[in-house]
């Protein structure tokens, strides 16, 4: 079992509802979302091509890739729309005060 | 339960590949044969004028599915195979060499081919078109740093090609017969922006300019303009549009009208034959007319629609047309096929190369084009789909949160 280390990545007021922000933890590009007041995090790059999802469009609990319109479930990372067929990695998120933390395996 | 039916797909293209995948995804257990005349598995075309031409990606990496994935899905792919006829009475196709393959259901995804420039010298080595992987590899092999590249046609392919060849160290000259770039696809304002953008990036754009002929001794050396002026160049890429590959369908007696005529579920006039992708003329409910699209999204989603129709799980397909193009550091995206709009609204700043222009008709978005702003375009697409009333003033206002417009 690998250990999870939490990293502060953003303030809660930086990500409005139905919005997404791209952050880096080390070299890892991560997309952090606000879905109905709850925060979630997935890997920041579409599984179809090398495109940052932070430029994508959040609708409900889906993130749509800005380039080819692949869609993923934000909460589970599941690929729901072609051309993507591989699920996105997700990360645990916790909020303390006004700070959002994303958990990365050490 | 075994299924002894055979479904054949003519055209190992993006659309054809999605037909095959859809058959398996929907649980079809019969035989699936995907036939292509090129030596490659179904590949992505967008990189052909960009990353593949730059040499940044391998041929394999452009495949939608690697061979192992196709094997696993039990999709039989026959490459280097040209279909010569469809015999609808016998329900067989004939391939070059005379072999015949029987089908229970057939999909035609033969796409389109480039329109050739009918002028003298167009067959000289050094004169290229850009449609296939083979074209890209040939251009890439011919490009030399410092060469002058003549691009004939200021449309999407021409402009993408000009950008990539410039990045490769060529001097790119674009000649366009019309008085503005991408004239059939965008407004004069956007054409002006494109002209400025390309000129700033070192492309020599010449509007209202045709070419009389290509000249050279066994290899392209120059183009001759009407009037006799010449421009020395070692390569030329012609991008003046494509023609749908309807001949097989036409010879088989299927209904043709600027493409193979299909219904909203991708079915042709023969109940056992579907068609998808660039080759079809299909109804679009959202636009209220028939269209033929040359787009990534249509090849994928109409392919999926056709696969379902082959399994008698037909679902109507209708989407707002969506296209994109990458030129230098600009990502352009377009929605709709606006024909008559009564006002436009530009959000963002054209000078900073980050904006979206909406076309409005009676207060409803009828289309839009974005430069480096895919997100607002996506919201625009939802607004267009929902036929939401909006005003130019609120679209232009940077304080307006686009998503909020969707919720009222």
Image (tube, coloured by chain):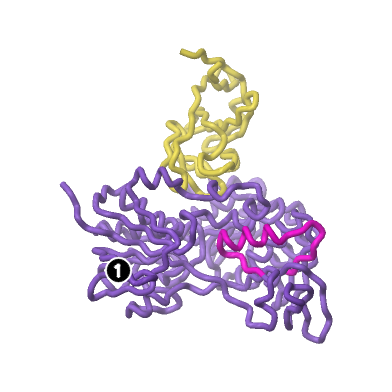
Residue at which label 1 appears:
B100
Which quarter of the picture shows residue A86? top left
In the rendered image of the structure, the colour used to display chain A is yellow
Which residue is found at the position 51% from the left and 74% from the top? B243
Which quarter of the picture shows residue B347? bottom right
Q: Is residue B100 magenta?
A: no
Which residue is found at the position 60% from the left and 68% from the top? B185
User: Is residue B80 among what the camera can see?
Assistant: yes
**Image x and y of residue A62, in percent:** 46, 40
> What span is in magenta?
B128-150
Which quarter of the picture shows residue B48? bottom right
Asked whether A56 or A104 is in front, the reply is A104
Q: Relative to A16, say whether B6 is above or below.
A: below
In the rendered image of the structure, the colour used to display chain B is purple
Q: Relative to B146, say whether B230 is above or below.
A: below
**Image x and y of residue B169, in percent:** 79, 55
Direction from residue A14 to residue B406 in the image, left or right? left
Other-residue count near label 1 (Cα within 10 Å), few / some / many at <14 / 14–19 / ≥20: some
**Chain where mark 1 sits:** B
Q: Farthest residue in the left direction?
A: B1
**Image x and y of residue B215, in percent:** 76, 79
Asked whether A85 or B387 is in front, the reply is A85
Q: Is residue B139 magenta?
A: yes
Asked whether B317 or B76 is in front, the reply is B76
Q: Farthest residue in the right direction?
A: B229
Q: Farthest residue in the front direction?
A: B97
């Amino acid at each position: 079992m690998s250990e999870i280390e939490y990293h502060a990545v953003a303030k809660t007021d930086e990500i409005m509802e139905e919005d997404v922000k791209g952050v880096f933890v080390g070299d890892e590009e991560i997309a952090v979302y606000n879905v109905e007041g709850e925060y979630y995090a997935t890997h920041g790059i579409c599984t179809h091509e090398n495109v940052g999802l932070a430029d994508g469009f959040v609708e409900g609990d889906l993130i749509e890739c800005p380039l080819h319109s692949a869609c993923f479930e934000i909460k589970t990372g599941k690929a729901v729309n072609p051309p993507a067929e591989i699920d996105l990695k997700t990360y645990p998120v916790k909020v303390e005060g006004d700070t959002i933390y994303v958990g990365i395996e050490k | 339960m075994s299924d002894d039916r055979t479904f054949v797909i003519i055209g190992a293209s993006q659309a054809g590949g999605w037909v095959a995948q859809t058959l398996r995804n929907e649980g079809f257990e019969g035989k699936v044969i995907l036939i292509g005349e090129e030596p490659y598995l179904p590949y992505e075309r967008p990189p052909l004028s960009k990353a593949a031409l730059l040499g940044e990606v391998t041929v394999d990496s452009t495949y939608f599915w690697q061979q192992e994935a196709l094997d696993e899905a039990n999709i039989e792919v026959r490459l280097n195979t040209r279909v010569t006829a469809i015999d609808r009475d016998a329900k067989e196709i004939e391939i070059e060499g005379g072999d015949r393959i029987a089908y229970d259901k057939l999909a035609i995804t033969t796409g389109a081919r480039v329109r050739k420039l009918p002028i003298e010298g167009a067959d000289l080595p050094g004169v290229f078109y850009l449609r296939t992987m083979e074209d890209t590899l040939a251009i890439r092999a011919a490009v030399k740093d410092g060469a002058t590249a003549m691009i004939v046609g200021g449309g999407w392919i021409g402009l993408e090609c000009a950008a990539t060849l410039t990045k490769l160290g060529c001097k790119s000259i674009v000649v366009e017969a019309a008085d503005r770039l991408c004239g059939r696809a965008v407004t004069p304002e956007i054409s002006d922006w494109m002209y400025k953008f390309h000129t700033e990036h070192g492309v020599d754009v010449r509007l209202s300019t045709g070419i009389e002929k290509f000249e050279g001794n066994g290899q392209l050396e120059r183009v001759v303009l009407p009037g006799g002026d010449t421009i020395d160049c070692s390569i030329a890429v012609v991008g003046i549009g494509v023609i749908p590959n309807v001949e097989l369908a036409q010879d088989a007696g299927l209904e043709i009208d600027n493409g193979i005529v299909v219904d909203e579920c991708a079915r042709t006039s023969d109940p056992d034959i579907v068609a998808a992708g660039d080759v079809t003329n299909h109804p679009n409910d959202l636009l209220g007319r028939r269209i033929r699209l040359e787009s990534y999204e249509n090849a994928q989603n109409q392919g999926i629609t056709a696969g379902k129709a082959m399994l008698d799980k037909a679902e109507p397909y209708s989407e707002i047309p969506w296209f994109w193009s990458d030129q230098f550091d600009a990502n352009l995206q377009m929605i709709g096929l606006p024909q008559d709009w009564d006002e436009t609204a530009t959000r963002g700043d054209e000078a900073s190369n980050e904006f979206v222009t909406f076309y409005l008709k009676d207060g409803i978005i009828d289309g839009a084009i974005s430069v480096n702003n895919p997100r607002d375009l996506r919201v625009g697409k939802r607004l267009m789909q929902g036929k939401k009333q909006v005003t130019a003033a609120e679209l232009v206002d940077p304080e307006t949160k686009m998503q909020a417009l969707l919720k009222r």
